[in-house]
Image (cartoon, grey):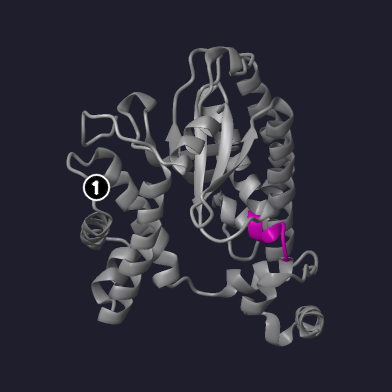
Amino acid sequence: MSSWSENDVALNPAQEDVLAVLGASKDERPRFEKVLRHELRRALDDALEPFVGLLDARADTKPGDNMFINKHALGRVMGCERRFLAEEAEEFAWSVPLARGTIAHKAIELSIHWRREPEPLVLVDESISRLSEGIDGLADWLQQATEVERAELRAEANDRVVKFLECFPPLKPGWRPATESRLRLEIHDRFILSGKVDLALGQAAGELAGKVLIDLKTGGFSPQHLDDLRFYALMEAIRLGTPPRRLATYYLDQGRFLPEDVTEDLLFSTVARVGDGVERILMLTSGQRDATTAPGPACRWCTALPDCEDGQRHLSEDEDDDSW
């Protein structure tokens, strides 16, 4: 049953796959102990406590300043540290590639609550209009964007919305769908973990897990996609007490899921990753150690490439491999 029609609709195979991956009976849902919430919080407290002094030692912070930690910062610093520093030095500026995801997610959010049949372009146009009325940097960029930029943004966001509506069944109100669901966790009143889940479905029933967290992606697989959702699962587990049941990255271009069930081991390993990532960020940004390199496909777009011999060598070898 969709949000805009009381009639059942025929599902295509991709939509049926979504139901098969995300659905679970009560007997299939894991149960977590109530103390887990406190154990995770205590583990995260212990992991970040040694770095309060490092935070104060950074040249760009004053005593008492907070450090904001999100999945993007963790993913970048756990990859190529030199690229992380190069991107940290850049001034952020909105562009079509950066704005299209926000516009598409807003349109998907509207589609869930739309009382008429959702038309992707109508939803995209409404999203652009709504977000243009804000007082943030995205609103400023949208108001000043050229006709070419707006047309490109509209086309790329529409493509994402079309694929979502094609691949996902109409979301029933009883599934408690929530888009762009914000999560926030403060540790030692200094470290602020934050993020937004693309789509959350279901709910916990006491200690019985029931929620599924979903990230919508275009393009291909990256190991970082798994880590992104694990980061959200950790915050959700500490916030609510009952962790999500399952995590699922959905690749819109391919119409397929990469699912992962949540376990206690997964959550505690994520605590360790957060601690490692925070230490790396603070050590690198305070100049207490040199950055390492991790050459890979992203070297092609890295702003540090002109001065990075490792990246240039990797791309040169890559071209040689392709030549035959």
Amino acid type, residue under disc 1 in the picture: Pro
Figure check: 176 above or below 219? above
Quadrant where the C terminus is found in the figure: bottom right
- The one of 130 and 323 positioned closer to us in this rendering: 323
The location of residue 126, given as percent across then percent down, is 21, 56
In the image, what residue occupies the spot 71% across and 33% down?
Answer: 266
Quadrant of residue 289 within the rendered picture: bottom right
User: Residue 233: x percent and y percent?
Assistant: 58, 35
- Residue depicted at 44% across the width and 26% down the height: 202
| Residue at (47% x, 39% y) in the render | 183
Range of residues picked out in magenta:
75-80
Residue 286 seen anywhere in this rendered image of the structure: no
Residue 78 rendering spot, x and y as whole percentages: 72, 57
Count residues near mark 1 (Cα–Cα under 10 Å), then give few for <14, some for 14-19, many for 20+: many
Looking at the picture, does residue 36 appear above or below residue 57?
A: above
Q: How many marks?
A: 1
Which x, y percent locates residue 67?
A: 57, 51
Q: Is residue 158 left or right of residue 204?
A: left
Q: Work out whether 112 lies above or below 122.
A: above
Q: Secondary structure at mark 1?
A: loop
Along the line of sight, which residue is nearer the eye, 246 or 237?
246
Q: Is residue 154 left or right of residue 101?
A: left
For image coordinates 69% across by 59% down, the residue present is 77
Residue 160 colored in magenta in the image: no
Residue 275 located left or right of residue 13? right
Quadrant location of the N terminus? top left
Residue topped by disc 1: 118
Q: Could you tell me if residue 302 is visible in this image?
A: yes
